[in-house]
Image (cartoon, rainbow, N blue to C red):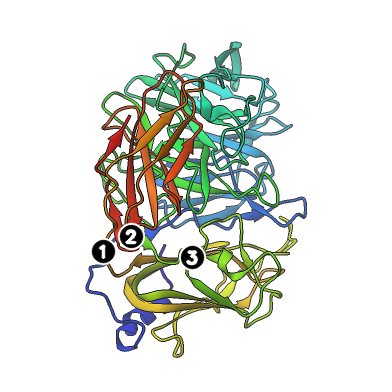
């Protein structure tokens, strides 16, 4: 995301002031961060939460279009980082789980809902969608339209803790009538697939919700993706089956869930879509969970994806809610990372505030959990939160996640933007403006500010100027860059105890690494395929309850702190 012109000017001048000495470091490409910075819409039930979920990104005529549930419209972008919103009055914008498919110059749209209409548009930059087909013959949830290379169209659907994922061929010459009887493609299988079990730790021994079908074709193979066990859980992920034919039979891919992010600031990476960018790179956009005020309080995450030489589909969520570099070329995501290397500097740092509500104390703005937050006692101008990083650091970027405490807004309300100031200081006494959002006109509940060059600073403060409604509240005052000192020592061994009675479970522990703030546990089905990951703080153990029965796994633990990441040199099976 680009900083404002004012911010860039301030950044260039900061070399002359005490808290803003430029670091001796070359600037990187423009950066962005998850959750994706969008104008997330308030719900229509008056409970005051925002949501967007079940995303689809389509590259159409060189432009990316992003559609998501309950969003009142959709977005478009030239670079997957800067999104422009287009409200829609011609689409069913209150329906869930949209799908889009392009045939030539025409984009077709469908969503879950009672009308079951299919829409079309020749130019989606204009809100001019027309009905192509009324009353699609199947009453479905979570639809997916798929165009095969030979021009055939297929339809996949399913959203249930009982019913399977289904598929059927459609007739292009008869406005997408079904051809034949829908076929069962993916059944629930919690006895073998631990990650399909519901619960925050995959602890409930019952079916989760299998949903969110999405088809991707790669080198003649059909990859049918699906989500489980439920959108409200931090373990929400996407698995995949593969076949030589669009309607199967399908074979389970043992590295499932291939999209999985149960740790970090914001968790979840399920019910999404896999797509190619204009350079030929694959990406996976998915649903991330907050689910505090309501189970459907959700956000969107974007992650690089790839197919390995054996044809296995993977999605890289490691450091997936840290700053990422934009992509402007063909990349090898199996070997190349877009993680900037900017580390989190704000975790559990000393905070102070002008006021706070009971249960929403200042330290909750820096505890790396989007599900808890600091809130002031009012939404008045002048309320503030300050942070002491403990030492002078090179600050590259700041992400703010506002919490909408007591906002109580609905989707039809006018949403005023958050307006605020961020200041920095070398001594906690003399403050200088780092970001002036006093004239902000853009609704961003997750705001991201990156600096052209690193700024030397120890103290930071955010001051409220105005709120959309309710009270000034922050779930994440996240500061990224590099701190002083050395990287942590490498983790040299990992002990794995896989439950012989239930091999879907494994308990891991490792020696604490001197200097580590946290760890990233990598695991996979081969020593060179450690692509699944879980981030943990303040502990040197992890329980994994989402493994696949009959699949062998390998594990490695990397340690990290404010200075960087140290790759583990011990691996376990």
Q: Which mark is residue 348?
A: 3
For label 1, count other residues whose C-alpha is less than 10 Å away and answer few (under 14), some (14-19) or many (20+). Answer: few
| 145 relative to 44, above or below | above
Ranked by sequence position, the earlier of labels 2 and 1 is 1
- Residue 550, position in %: x, y? 42, 18
Q: Which mark is residue 486?
A: 1
Q: Which mark is residue 95?
A: none
For label 2, count other residues whose C-alpha is less than 10 Å away and answer few (under 14), some (14-19) or many (20+). Answer: some
Alpha carbon distance from label 3 to label 1: 19 Å
Q: Determine the secondary structure under disc 3.
A: loop
Toward the viewer: 552 or 422? Answer: 552
- Residue 519, position in %: x, y? 38, 50
- Residue 20, position in %: x, y? 34, 82
Alpha carbon distance from label 2 to label 1: 8 Å
Q: Determine the secondary structure under disc 1.
A: loop
- Rendered-image quadrant of the C terminus: top left
Q: Residue furthest right?
A: 46
Alpha carbon distance from label 3 to label 2: 15 Å
The residue beneath circle 2 is 515
| 308 relative to 12, above or below | above
| 65 relative to 505, above or below | below
Q: Residue furthest bottom?
A: 430
| 312 relative to 2, above or below | above
Toward the viewer: 107 or 562? Answer: 562
Q: Could you tell whether 236 is left or right of 396 in the image?
A: right
- Rendered-image quadrant of the N terminus: bottom left
Point 47% across, 19% down: residue: 152
């Amino acid at each position: 995301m680009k900083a404002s012109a004012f911010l860039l000017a301030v950044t260039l001048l900061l070399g002359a002031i005490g808290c803003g000495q430029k670091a001796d470091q070359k600037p990187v490409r423009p950066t962005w961060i998850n959750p994706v910075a969008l104008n997330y819409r308030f719900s229509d039930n008056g409970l005051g939460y925002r949501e967007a979920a079940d995303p689809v990104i389509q590259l159409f005529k060189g432009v990316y279009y992003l559609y998501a549930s309950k969003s009142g419209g959709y977005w478009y972008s030239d670079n997957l980082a800067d999104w422009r919103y287009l409200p829609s009055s011609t689409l069913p914008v209150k329906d869930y789980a949209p799908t889009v498919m392009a045939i030539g110059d025409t984009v077709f749209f469908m969503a879950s809902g009672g009308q079951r209409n299919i829409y079309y548009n020749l130019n989606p930059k204009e809100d001019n969608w027309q009905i192509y087909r009324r009353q699609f013959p199947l009453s479905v949830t979570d639809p997916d339209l798929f165009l095969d290379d030979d021009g055939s169209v297929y339809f996949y659907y399913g959203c249930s803790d009982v019913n399977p994922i289904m598929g059927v061929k459609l007739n292009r010459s008869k406005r997408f009538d079904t051809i034949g009887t829908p076929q069962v493609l993916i059944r629930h299988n919690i006895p073998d697939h631990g990650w399909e079990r519901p619960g925050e730790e995959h602890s409930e021994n019952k079916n989760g919700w299998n949903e969110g079908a999405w088809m991707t074709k790669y080198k003649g193979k059909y990859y049918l993706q699906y989500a489980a066990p439920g959108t409200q859980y931090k373990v929400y992920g996407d698995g995949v089956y593969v076949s030589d034919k669009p309607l199967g039979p399908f074979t389970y891919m043992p590295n499932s869930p291939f999209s999985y992010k149960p740790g970090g600031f914001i968790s979840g990476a399920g019910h999404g879509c896999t797509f190619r960018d204009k350079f030929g790179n694959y990406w996976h956009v998915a649903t991330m969970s907050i689910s505090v005020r309501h189970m459907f309080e959700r956000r969107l995450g974007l992650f690089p994806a790839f197919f390995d030489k054996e044809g296995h589909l993977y999605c890289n969520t490691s450091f997936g809610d840290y700053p990422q570099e934009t992509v402007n070329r063909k990349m090898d995501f199996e070997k190349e990372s877009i993680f900037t290397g900017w580390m989190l500097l704000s975790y559990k740092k000393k905070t102070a505030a002008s006021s706070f509500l009971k249960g929403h104390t200042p330290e909750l703005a820096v505890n790396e959990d989007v599900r808890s937050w600091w809130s002031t006692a009012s939404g008045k101008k002048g309320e503030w939160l300050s942070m002491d990083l403990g030492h002078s650091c090179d600050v590259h970027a700041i992400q703010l996640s506002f919490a909408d405490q007591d906002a109580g807004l609905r989707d039809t309300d006018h949403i005023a933007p958050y307006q605020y100031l961020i200041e920095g200081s070398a001594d906690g006494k003399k403050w200088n403006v780092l970001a002036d959002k006093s004239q902000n006109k853009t609704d961003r509940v997750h705001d991201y500010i990156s600096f052209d060059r690193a700024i030397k600073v120890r103290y930071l403060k955010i001051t409220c100027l105005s709120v959309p409604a309710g009270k000034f509240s922050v779930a994440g005052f996240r500061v990224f860059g590099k701190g002083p000192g050395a990287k942590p020592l490498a983790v040299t061994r990992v002990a794995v105890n896989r439950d012989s009675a239930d091999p879907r479970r494994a308990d891991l522990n490792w020696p604490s690494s001197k200097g580590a703030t946290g760890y990233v546990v990598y695991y996979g089905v081969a020593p060179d395929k450690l692509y699944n990951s879980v981030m943990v703080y303040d502990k040197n153990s992890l329980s994994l309850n989402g493994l696949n029965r009959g699949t062998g796994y390998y594990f490695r633990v990397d340690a990290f702190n404010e200075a960087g990441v140290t790759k583990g040199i011990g691996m376990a099976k």
